[in-house]
Image: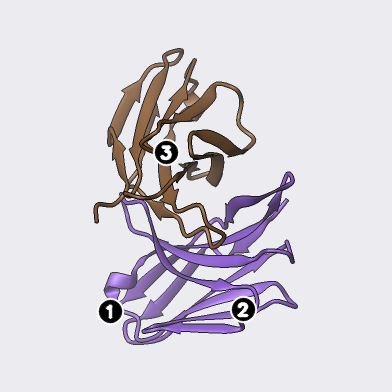
Chain colours: A purple, B brown
Amino acid sequence: GEDVEQSLFLSVREGDSSVINCTYTDSSSTYLYWYKQEPGAGLQLLTYIFSNMDMKQDQRLTVLLNKKDKHLSLRIADTQTGDSAIYFCAAKGWSSGSARQLTFGSGTQLTVLP
Amino acid sequence: KAGVTQTPRYLIKTRGQQVTLSCSPISGHRSVSWYQQTPGQGLQFLFEYFSETQRNKGNFPGRFSGRQFSNSRSEMNVSTLELGDSALYLCASSTGTADEKLFFGSGTQLSVL
């Protein structure tokens, strides 16, 4: 089945750019997602990209997809303290014969320092 | 438009008991998925319901079950609770289309003593 991996921690200074990386194993994954989770809350969908795209930009967020290397990244420009949260990468691929399951990475804890 | 609503927000149970969690999806969404989130295992998929039918199932024991009603509301049941079932249970709704954008509720924090 699909496996999604992320680094666990990232610290940046306020105003800098943050780059969160993710790798996945299933080359047939059709959609890839980034979610944000703040303490005590559920997951908030930030953005997503279809597998035939290389890049998607949405205000301060830029998603880059390298399909050959099965590598996904999320860049947050001008990072603010309110961006401190856990960021999850998720891939929609095949698992036990079904394409409908999203597999999540373990999450990257982003800490924004003043 | 109201978001995904999960009740209750917190639950405390003892080993051997059973528990039912509820999820009301976004209006118009026909798919409801359930996930278990723990510090050690991360987010693990439990099952997905679409139009009252279980469409996909993760690798959890039969003690974990669910159902979906005609109004798309869903319930999840865990019987014979174990200490390891302590977790945040998240419900997510979607339209059920190919892009599978999931919208999550705030979750039910279950503690098993």
Q: Determine the residue positioned at 61% across, 83% down.
A: A54
- Number of marks drawn: 3
Q: Secondary structure at mark 3?
A: strand
User: Left of B60 or right of it: where is A108?
Assistant: left
- A30 and B36: which is toward the camera: A30
Tell me the kind of residue under disc 2: Leu
Q: Is residue A44 visible?
A: yes
Q: Residue A40: where, in percent of width, then height?
A: 30, 49
- Whether pointer 3 and pointer 1 mark residues with C-beta atoms closer than 8 Å, the reply is no
Q: Residue at x 73, y 64 (%)?
A: A28
Q: Quadrant of the C terminus of chain A?
A: bottom left
Q: Residue at x 38, y 51 (%)?
A: B104
> In front of the other: label 3 or label 1?
3
Between disc 1 and disc 2, the foreground one is 2
The quadrant holding residue B70 is top left
Q: State the mark number for residue A114.
A: 1
The residue indicated by pointer 2 is: A65
Q: Which residue occupies 39% across, 38% down?
A: B72
Q: Position of residue B100 (x, y in %)?
A: 52, 58
- Front-most of B36 and B74? B74
The amino acid beneath tag 1 is Pro
Helix, strand or loop status at disc 2: strand
Dot 1: element: loop
Q: Give me the C-alpha separation between circle 3 and circle 2.
A: 30 Å
Dot 2: within a 10 Å radius of its alpha carbon, few (fewer than 14), some, or many (20 or more) residues?
many
Classify 10 Å Cα crowding around label 1: few (below 14), some (14-19), many (20 and above).
few
Q: Marks 1 and 2, Cα distance to the nearest angstrom?
A: 30 Å
Specify the amino acid type for callout 3: Tyr
* Circle 3 residue: B89
Q: Is residue B113 visible?
A: no
Q: How many residues crowd mark 3 within 10 Å: few (<14), some (14–19), many (20+)?
A: many
